[in-house]
Image (tube, rainbow, N blue to C red):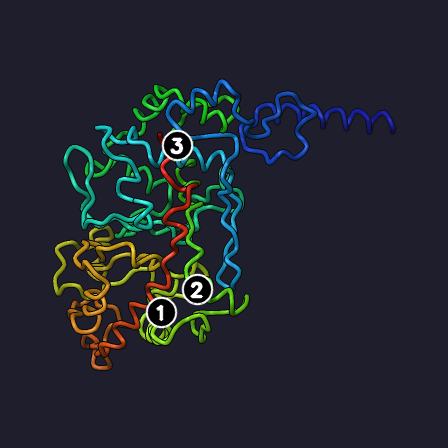
Amino acid sequence: MKNEILLFLLFGCIIFSQSSCKSDDRSHGQGGQMFANFWQGPEPFTNEELTILNETLNISNTLPDFDVNNLGHSNGTSRIVEPYTAMLGRVLFYDKVLSDDLSISCASCHQQSLAFADNQAFSDGVNGNQTLRNSIALGSFPSFISTYGAGAVNDTINQKLFWDERSSTIHNQLTATIQNPNEMGQLLYSLNLRLNDRPYYPILFKRLSKEGTITNARILTALATFLGSIHSQNSLLDQALIQMGTNSTIDQDLEMFNLSQELGRELFVENCMSCHGKSIFESADILFTSANNGLEEEYLDRGIGAITFDENDNGKFKIPSLRNIEMTAPYMHDGRFETLQEVIEFYNSGIQAHLNLNEELKDVDGNPKQFNFTEEEKIALIDFLKTMTDETLLIDSKYSDPFK
């Protein structure tokens, strides 16, 4: 019996060793040292590698902490993000090599100083083209990164990405953006060759896998990991909720707010939360992820309706995040409003009677709602919206341009 047990253990070790040698997945360093070929994740850069990297980049072995930390209140969230993968994603995000004519990077349309939005209605794309819609700001609460960033980009959750919600996974969204002729215009199959020609990429990709091969999937995973690490968590609103304790919510009085901010909060909860709850906090209840908000009686851009071919979806667009809204003008899918004052006035008196107008924007008779805010209330709403500005996000070096 003793010999049978020894044979069983030996056979199990052989099987484990063979499967480990074949593995190209990330490990977090648990129990792999007994096998010489076991992939345990990235090794620090060598001095020779750092010399090559720092000809172009500002990179060291002291990596930023890309983890998404709990905000300290009931709407908080936490995720562990693998730093080498996020760093590679950061380099890709700022590299114009991703575009066909080498003129556009992801950061061209998503600028950190603007809360990863753009300050023009339609962003500049490759070959003199422009995007067809306004660039959506980043840095809200991305839900596509699960517990371990690099090895577990959750590409199965229905994300409803883009203004028309046409992409259901972050990998599809990134692929569509890179290959869109009005945006980056770069075919993924040729991008691999381009990256191989840059001396820093083989070194960086070696931290994603044992053999360091540059593949489409690894490009997308690195970008998704970096994007998932961008999070806004230090606004006045967050600080006010943290002060109130872990069970605090936006629908209670917040002691840190002045009178105008507090009035704006009350107005927002009463009039705006049904659509914009989740655009502030990932875990907040929400009735809608998209809506027709009555910008026009007839939309030239049909939004989701152009994707589903359902007339009931005409004029419906994704409801974007309101975090850092002060920094992300112009507003709406077509950037038609230059200021928050214009946005508030639209909802106050300008909603149009489209057939698909969201029910929350109708009065008891089914007509477009007139909110009839006073001037004091309009100012208060804007003051509240500005409490969502996270100044830290706008200058945080771990999200900044790594190129010299």
Rate crowding at label 2 as few (under 14), some (14 to 19) or many (20 or more) other CA atoms within 10 Å. some
**Against 170, is 256 above or below?**
below
List the residue tagged with mark 3. 219
Question: Disc 2 vs disc 3: Cβ atoms closer than 8 Å?
Answer: no
The amino acid on which the numbered mark 2 sits, given as a three-letter code, is Ala
Q: Quadrant of residue 225?
A: top left
Frontmost residue, 147 versus 137: 137
**Against 5, is 82 above or below?**
below
Q: Identify the secondary structure beneath mark 3.
A: helix
Q: Which mark is residue 36?
A: none
Question: Disc 1 vs disc 2: Cβ atoms closer than 8 Å?
Answer: yes
Question: Going 31% across and 74% down the picture, which residue do you hit?
Answer: 271
List the residue tagged with mark 1. 273
User: Where does residue 57 sit, x and y in percent of width and height?
Assistant: 39, 28
Q: Identify the secondary structure beneath mark 1.
A: helix
- Nearer-N-terminus badge (3/1): 3
C-alpha gap between disc 2 and disc 3: 32 Å
User: Where does residue 166 sit, x and y in percent of width and height?
Assistant: 29, 48
Question: Going 36% across and 71% down the picture, which residue do you hit?
Answer: 261
**Against 149, is 294 above or below?**
below
Frontmost residue, 15 versus 269: 269
The amino acid on which the numbered mark 1 sits, given as a three-letter code, is Met
- Nearer-N-terminus badge (2/3): 3
List the residue tagged with mark 2. 284
Frontmost residue, 176 versus 348: 348
User: Where does residue 91 sit, x and y in percent of width and height?
Assistant: 38, 33
Q: Identify the secondary structure beneath mark 2.
A: loop
